Amino acid sequence: MQNQKKHWLSIILILLVAVGGIAGTLAYFTATRTAANNKFTTGTLDLSVTGDNNIVNEPFVIENMGANANISGTKTWTIKNTGTLP
């Protein structure tokens, strides 16, 4: 008799967890939110990249790294949007 009670209690607990999971998932997928003043803008995004001397696509070369690979230095690129998006 004691073993049968544990069996039914286990089944009831499994069903309660399943119902709770289904209810939580249903609530998550049916929730809605609204936001005012959202705008979508279409256009083009064209990035122009120039190096230090206004050379387009100037290569970045690393030479003579040595055994300890101690590298230092700087490189500056200018990125500009030449498309229609702001």
Image (spheres, rainbow, N blue to C red):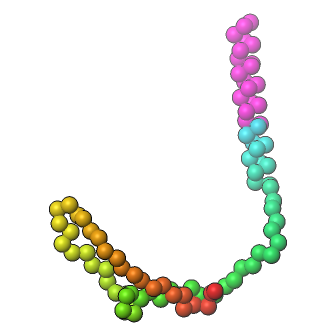
Q: Residue furthest front?
A: 73
Q: Quadrant of residue 43?
A: bottom right
Depth check: 60 or 23 in front? 60
List x then y, in percent, for residue 76.
40, 81
Image point 81% across, 62% down: which residue? 33
Give the main secondary structure, helix, strand or loop, of the magenta stretch. Answer: helix
Where residue 66 sits in the image (x, y, percent)?
17, 66
Residues in magenta? 1-19
Q: With 73 as the anchor, is 17 left or right in this view?
A: right
Q: Is residue 27 above or below residue 51?
A: above
Residue found at x 38% / y 87%: 51
Residue at image coords 80%, 55%: 31
Residue 42, image x and y in percent?
A: 67, 85
Query: How many numbered marks are there?
Result: 0
Which residue, as the protein is rendered here, is positioned at the far top? 1
Q: Is residue 20 above or below residue 85?
A: above
Determine if the magenta segment contains residue 63.
no
Q: Is residue 40 left or right of residue 81?
A: right
Q: Residue at x 76, y 37 (%)?
A: 20
Tell me the quarter of the image containing the C terminus.
Answer: bottom right
In magenta segment, residue 14: yes
Quarter where residue 82 is shown:
bottom right
Q: Nearer the viewer, residue 23 or 86?
A: 86
Q: Quadrant of residue 52?
A: bottom left
Picture layout, residue 28 above or below residue 73: above
Q: Quadrant of the N terminus?
A: top right
